[in-house]
Amino acid sequence: MPSNALKPPKNSKMPGIFRHQIMIPIAALVLLALFNLIADPSFFKITMGQTSNGDPVLTGQLITIIDYGSEVAILALGMTLVTASSGGQDISVGAACAIAGSVLLRVLCGTETSPEKLHAPIIVGFLVSMLVAMIFGAFNGALVAFFKIQPMVATLILFTAGRSIAAWVNHNQLPNVNEPSFGYFGSYIPGIPIPTPFCIALLCFLVTFLILKFTTLGLYVQSVGINEKTSRLNGLNPEMIKLMTYVFLGICVAVTGFIKVSRLSTINYSVVAKDIEMDAILAVALGGNALSGGKFSMSSSILGAYVIQFLTTTLYKFDVKSDALPAYKAVVVIILVIMSAPAVREKLSQLGKKLRAEKHTAESA
Amino acid sequence: MKVKKMLAFAASLAVCTAMFAGCGSSGSGDTTAPKSEDTGNTADAGEAKTDAGSGDLIKVGIINNDPNESGYRTANDKDLKATFTKENGFDASFAYSLKNDEQISHAQKFIQDDVDYLLLSAADTAGWDSVLKDAQDAGVKVILFDRTIDADPSLYEASIVSDMAKEGQTAVDWLKSQNLDKYEVIHIQGVMGSAAQKGRSGALTDTANAEGWTIVTEQTAEWNAEKAQQIVQSVIDSGKSFNVIYAENDDMAKGAVAALDKANISHGVGKDVIVMGFDCNKWALEELKAQNWNYDGQCNPFQSSYIKDIIDKLENGETISEKTIVMDEKGFDAATITQEDVDNYGI
Amino acid sequence: MQDGSLLELRGIYKSFPGVKALQNVDFTLREGEIHALMGENGAGKSTLIKVLTGVYVKDEGDIYIKGHTGPVQIHSPKQAQEVGISTVYQEISLCPNLSVAENIFLGRSEGRIISWRKMNKQAGELLDSLGIAVKPTQQLASCSIAVQQMVAIARAVDMDCSVLILDEPTSSLDESEVAKLFVLMRKLKDRGVGIIFVTHFLDQVYEVCDRITVLRDGKLVGEYEIEKLPRVQLVSKMLGKELDDMADIKNESPEYDSKSDEFVYEGKGLCSSEGISPFDFNIRKGEINGFTGLLGSGRSECVRTIFGADKVTGGTVKVDGKEVRISKPIDAMKQGIAYLPEDRKRDGIIGDLSVRDNIILALQVKTGFFKPFSKAKATEFAEKYIKLLDIKTASVNTPIKSLSGGNQQKVILGRWLLTEPKYLILDEPTRGIDVGTKVDIQKLMLKLASEGMSVTFISSETDEMLRTCSRLLVMRDRKLVGELTGDQLTQNTIMATIAGGEKDAE
């Protein structure tokens, strides 16, 4: 039919953005947003509230998402690099967060469980905890880079032992910080209506993007992740680069641990940042990054992290049992894994070709 | 090449294990120290046995879960240690494990050491029959505390436990007694299926049904403060109104309060939202005392006085009328709590 | 079938999409002989063996085996075993965590209950009869590679094989182990087993084999008695250059000032973890020289040592007369040395990255971690070399893996040219790419040399090297065995030097 013949063939030219991997989290986000829009538009309501001191704060589901999604997003930064460089994931980040948080409280509270005055400035505590987290990151990185142990296996060590170490740091006490300004980092800084965790996350994103822009880290990490042998022949030191990504993840872990501890001004070793490693890995996967390493897109991972929180918040809002949450996440993982399997991709592209070919024959007929 | 790699791997593993073992052992230093004392004690006891006829010291073997497991367990262990002292006429040996089979072998060792009483908080309910029979044959009297087991009641003298449903009921009764205009409750549950969760949830659900209370949301936060915070945050964000937070432990209550603070919702005595927790952590009782929370239900870790009671009775030849003894468990009201309560009952 | 033949292949054809791997190949193996199967890479040796062992199914042709009337069909490795063909590969495919005896009898109990004592006794007898000094109860992994190989052979022999294929068995053995293996091979030969021996080592062929079959480009070149085929002729047959045809085709090579003493690179006593004998090497400014030798002779390992790509275990290096240490690639790069590796896919490209990133990589690494090129700058670099080398790519953003082999090679070449090296090492830059690109690359080499760059060139195609190099270093069996310059640069002398040993037999 002539009218049909005039139609331009579909899929022949898509703008670059539509092929970019960031489309995966964007599509998921749009899907979730649409669902909420239809189910209950009040989901998107943001109101300006006030704290007891009269400082303005923003509240609403969306604010909650950017607030609680920030920890995973920060971890996703490091997890993306680790994944890209070593083709595996660090499953010990949750345990490492517990250690970082524990060290932070140990420095701030000394050996008291609930000191009247902090023993050290918060920044000192944070820097010490960051140092410790970086050392543990380096430990993981060394196992992976120099001993060539599978990342999941290597980090299984810390995954298993981490929370015990965290408990040991504070002699099994659960210190409590009474200093109100410590709580600012998990809620709001007076005068700033945006949740502090999100501000911290923004700062981390900024720093990461500056690092990627003003150093060659991105190129090196991808090169090492794609082809280690070639990278070495081009003068890179793949072991050092892998190690670096794990140390970087250590920094992310320290920041996350800090936020987590600040939210409650205390810590519970056995449950703090529980299962966060799975969310961080899921964020990387949801960002369309290959879990086998190589090319990565940082912004996709970040978006992936917030999509996960979007999902969580949506499920909470609709009173889905929270112990069923992992099941929903599992569904997302299954879909992602299946869609990214080479066999399925091939089938899909074949199907696409076939459809186009059929269309073509139909047109010419 | 491969062999080399494997060696390197093995070496690194060995290093790691050594490292963590180092950490672990220093972490559980409290655990091992009393154990080494044990052996000394039992040796002493062996000598003491010659003049045991005078009945100087009563020899007890205590098998407990690792005190590092939780604040509850730490308090429990401390309490036992404070009661079963030489001054009180006891020669106590302690053994800790979270594993049933290890506990059983500890029990066998105690039986061999000829203890008079075996006090047991079992890690697992099953598998105790044969060892308890051995104890009976050897004339060792067994008293269970904190945890029950699946064994014939004739194998032990008494079992001292908490009644979680009663704890829940006490709390719900207190809530009922507040005579609020309306009851809109956020119910934050523990790990689903655990004894504490079942008991504490059951009381609330039943009463809410009977009294027509509104349960705004009922979610498990799995004893996790962070999750509790998110659950409450979600309720706040959706603009639902509520005036009671019933959290099945202190940690979760704390998480919920963090969400309230963030949203500038007042809570505590005479404020908008009533906050209820369980377990009587010291810090939680302090919150009560500061009027930030309203109620905290006790899960009594202090079984030693009950145990001592039973031992005294048995030593005097009396019989125990009730095999299962449920401990008194208090509920603290912010309005009436005193510093003494905080000091005595905080764990 | 002829008398005394164990195995005959007649008119075997096998092709893969786009490649005719075997065309009308005949092969005969007699009882009690060791028969060398020779040919350069891609000649069809491994395809032929895979046809024999049932890994591939031939397209056409017949296989006859003694004791079977009419042609036999081999469709699977199991069928090959049933007709008495066994293979021992370079990579031993036994179970390292089982004992020697268990390995010998593994998978052959046919449902019978195994008596361990009986099994060990039988294995012991077998090993004794073959003169293999190992206890049947020893764990295989604790044996040396040579012993493992012999155990594999013993297993094959015990399965009543009449045809034994040894695929590169000696490449990971030292000299004494090779000698032991040869003793075993001769013993089997005396028992009437026919052995097909695939190797790159010419010396070994002449030491142990009776006859040689040479393949080239999937075709049979011929079958020869070992006494009647001098080494140099064997080499010429493998390379496909008849001695008579070897008119001097040289003299396009550039004129450089050979008196210039300006060595860009001087290495003494270089050796690496890859097991090449220590060698000396130097190159002058503007010179093109090359390493030649058969595949596996160690020519790539030499240049890898120069570049620090393998672990350098000894030697001293001077660059521009100053002593320097080159232990890893970045050291070499800082001295202005560039290396285009032999295995493009494994060592050359970063598959998923764009053409642009692939081009700038080496220069970027050299420039430093804190000085990344802007995207505009990188694109500019990339476009410059895309134009200069006429790289056919959709855009600078195209992933390199979607380019053709020749264009990938040009990208890698561009990557190294971008670093403006003073000394460029090209290891098989022309392999597997089309003729046009080959010529381009040769021309480019000559041009670069005329501009003062020093180039070391390795190619399996001798005429390419003759056309471009003014000096050739000849490798044999991982040793540098000769250096040819000026008038010596002819096919004949090259082959004679490669063959070694029998120069006067010519």
Image: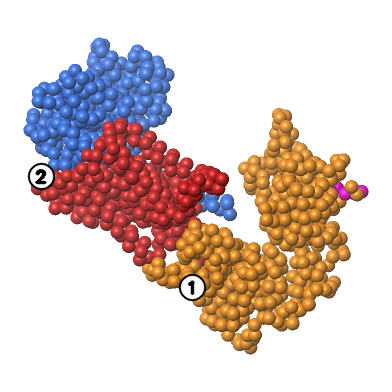
Chain colours: A red, B blue, C orange
Q: Nearer the viewer, residue A280 or C58?
A: C58
* Residue matched to label 1: C384
What distance separates the C-alpha of mark 2 from that of mark 1?
A: 64 Å
Report the side of C2 relative to C143 (left or right): right
Residue at screen point 49% across, 61% down = C398
Q: Kindly tell me whether residue C404 is visible in this rendering.
A: yes
The three-letter code of the residue at mark 1 reads Lys
Q: Chain of mark 2?
A: A
Residues B237 and B93: in front is B237
Relative to A42, residue B302 above or below: above
Task: Tell me the quarter of the picture where residue C238 sits.
Answer: bottom right
> Residue A163: percent from the left, percent from the top?
34, 42
What's the mark number on residue A52? 2
Q: Secondary structure at mark 1?
A: helix
Q: Nearer the viewer, residue C370 or C162?
A: C370
Residue C40 drawn at (x, y percent) = 72, 62
Chain containing mark 1: C
Q: Residue at x 39, y 50 (%)?
A: A23
Per the rendered image, the range of residues in magenta is C3-7
| Disc 1 packing (10 Å; few <14; some 14–19; many ≥20) | some
